[in-house]
Amino acid sequence: MSKLPMTATMSSTRPTQSSGIIVAIGAVTGPLRQDAPLDLWATLGWDAYAYEAVYNPARISRADAEAAVREQLAEFGAQVAAFLDEDEPLTASQRGVEWMLRWGCTPDCTADHTDRHTPDWHTSHRVETALRDIDASCSPEENAALPWLAAQVVVINDKARAYGRTTRVWIDYGATTGELSPAEARQALTELRAFTDRLEAVVEAAERSATADFSGDPEIARLDREATDHRVRTITEDAR
């Protein structure tokens, strides 16, 4: 394979080739160092993976990025055992014990606590519906930015000796968020399952009704609008 332009920050300690190493890899949309299509660096101190790589999918495919990483590390006597998909946020357990101890993370926490904008609480991977929001008061573009439903586990344990530890389930419905205890979330799940049967009955009734729907005549609609406009003008003029 031809040499691919990339940047790399290598570990001063050569990995063990016999066992191989794990590389976390993910796509980014912004520019990388030296405008390279791929960037690779060592993540010393984390026992879940030894290197992290990011690539620009507009300039290189995932397969070619992985091949380039393998080739680059092979020059340092390192063999890649596996890639961790960082397109999905890494969990704290994947980041390693040192990470979990430093930030007090739960194993499934996906928050990047090195980002100063990240809150102190710990969040699991967010599950959401493929269907986007259905708010009739919003534009299609606004609705497309939000899932119809989403949920995740949130654990708050900052200064736990003073304030304790709290687990919540955050359920998002459009732009609104409900913060539920696990017991309340279980109740919501039970109600949701029961509601789907009733919703199906409503949808079936609507489907039967929709068989009689029709579009109407555009020319009659135009004449009606003109008549309405004339009537409004007449009333407005009489009121002056």
Image (cartoon, grey):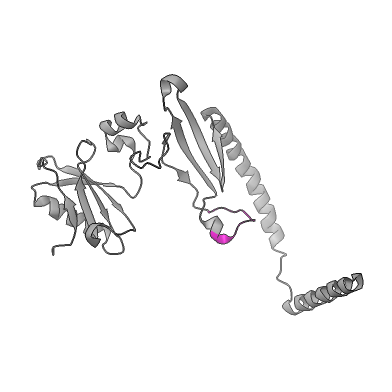
Q: Where residue 227 sits: x, y (%)?
A: 83, 76
* Residue under the image location 52 percent in, 52 percent down: 146
Residue 178: quarter of image:
top right
Q: Where residue 46 sits: x, y (%)?
A: 23, 36
Q: Is residue 187 magenta?
A: no
* Residue under the image location 33 percent in, 42 percent down: 90
Furthest residue to the front? 240
Q: Nearer the viewer, residue 47 or 30?
A: 30
Q: Where residue 27 sits: x, y (%)?
A: 31, 54
Q: Is residue 135 magenta?
A: yes
**Quarter of the rendering occupied by the N terminus:** bottom left
Furthest residue to the right? 238
Q: Is residue 4 above or below residue 24?
A: below
Instruction: Tell me which secondary structure the magenta stretch mostly adopts.
Output: loop
Task: From the viewer's perspective, tell me whether residue 2 is left or right of residue 176.
Answer: left
* Residue under the image location 32 percent in, 55 percent down: 28
Q: Nearer the viewer, residue 21 or 154?
A: 154
Q: Which residues are magenta?
A: 132-141
Residue 121: quarter of image:
top left
Q: Is residue 229 above or below residue 84?
A: below
Task: From the viewer's perspective, tell me whether residue 210 is left or right of residue 105.
Answer: right
Q: Nearer the viewer, residue 74 or 213?
A: 74
Q: Is residue 36 visible?
A: no
Q: Nearer the viewer, residue 222 or 53?
A: 53
Task: From the viewer's perspective, tell me whether residue 64 is left or right of residue 197.
Answer: left
Q: Where residue 82 sits: x, y (%)?
A: 21, 46
**Quarter of the rendering occupied by the C terminus:** bottom right
Q: Is residue 33 above or below residue 120?
A: below
